[in-house]
Amino acid sequence: MKRLKGSAIFFIPAAFIPIVLILGIFFWFSCAYGGSPPKTVHKDWPGSLKILTGASGGQWDSLGNSIAEVLTRSVLPSSCRLGGAIGNINRINKNMGDLGFSISCFLQSSELQEDLGIDPFGNNTTLLTILYPQVLYVLIRKEFAEKQGINNLGDLLKKRGPIRFATLKKGTGSHYLLKLLLKYGYNTTFEGLKHQGWQINFHNYSEIADNFANQQLDCFAYTAGREVPLILSMEQFIDIKLLPISKQVLKPLHDKLHINICTLQPGIYKSVTKPVTTLGDYACLVVRKDFPESLVYEINKALWENKKYISEDVQDFRFLCPNLSLQKGIKLHPGAEKFWNQIHNDHGRQQ
């Protein structure tokens, strides 16, 4: 083929066309996703990352996908698998996952780990970072609560069935925190409530929301962040009430198992018209303890540098900051500790 004057068109042999196409696709992918993983080859890094998230339809499910996208772009190719706060820890201990979502109190009490059947944390799981406050929500239909004279969780647990109740499946943080609350706060169990005539179901977030909206549930309980889209959506169609938990009930859990107390203030949910005390802790990411310091440092760096982007998907991610992860009593992976101390010190110098 002749080259036309003033143009840049050349003849490309047929044998080279597949190679050109492959290079073109790679170039397009790199541009479309804002770059590629670091060019430096780390022999002690894995080839990819497996992120263990949470129950389908929840914040961790959505957040995991955003984080996987960021890490693929900045660190290593990453993919997600559904999971739960306890199951994620056990799977990472067995090298069946690389990092995963959990709740920080599960990292701080050996007594709590034994109670929940968690493999010892001396194995291969440690903290990557604290993400945001995690709250236990106990929601009930307002009309049902008023008819039954239910003003708090204690009132609800005294009722004999039929009461249609749901929480998340076994292996999730919601399931185990509620189980602990029933055991240490009210001296009862799921089985005990069934003997009272309760109908108890274990679902994921989306199923619970659908069943509640369709009047197939009277009440439900699960943990989530401070601003939960599913609850905000339900409030548009259903009159609900968020049940408080007395501080006298929560204090033994705090003293014995390091589980925190949280107060929800009016302003986010229209059903919260006065402060509501409940059980609360922190959502976190855990990681394989045997991962290299350099890799864990880069993972935290990618999360921090993309905080605004990830927060567009899950607003609670905006709570990410050095002070949360550097709290006393929380032991970080050395790579995470190095990164968060560096960010903390940099912010101190800028002030």
Image: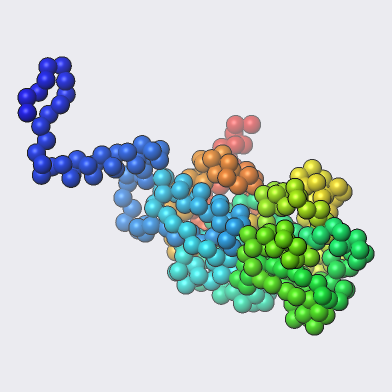
Taking the view exactly as shown, the residue that stands out farthest to the top is 6
Left or right, 139 with respect to 88, comes to right
Could you tell me residue 163's position as x and y percent?
81, 72
Could you tell me residue 194's position as x and y percent?
77, 80
Taking the view exactly as shown, the residue that stands out farthest to the front is 214
Name the quadrant containing residue 328.
bottom right
Left or right, 239 with respect to 94, comes to right
Residue at x 82%, y 49% (from the top left corner): 272
Q: Is residue 45 above or below residue 106?
A: above
Taking the view exactly as shown, the residue that stands out farthest to the bottom is 195
Could you tell me residue 79's position as x and y percent?
44, 57
Total marks drawn? Answer: 0
Q: Is residue 233 above or below residue 281?
A: above
Could you tell me residue 8's position as x and y percent?
16, 24
**Foreground: 52 or 220?**
220
Taking the view exactly as shown, the residue that stands out farthest to the left is 2
Residue at x 56%, y 52% (from the top left corner): 62
Q: Is residue 342 above or below residue 224?
A: above
Name the quadrant containing residue 311.
top right
Left or right, 225 with respect to 25, comes to right
Asked which colour scheme the image uses, the reply is: rainbow
**Considering the image in quadrants, where does the N terminus appear?**
top left
Name the quadrant containing residue 332.
bottom right
Left or right, 66 with respect to 173, comes to left
**Foreground: 57 or 116?**
57
Residue at x 81%, y 79% (from the top left corner): 197
Residue 292 visible? The answer is no
Residue 227 visible? The answer is yes
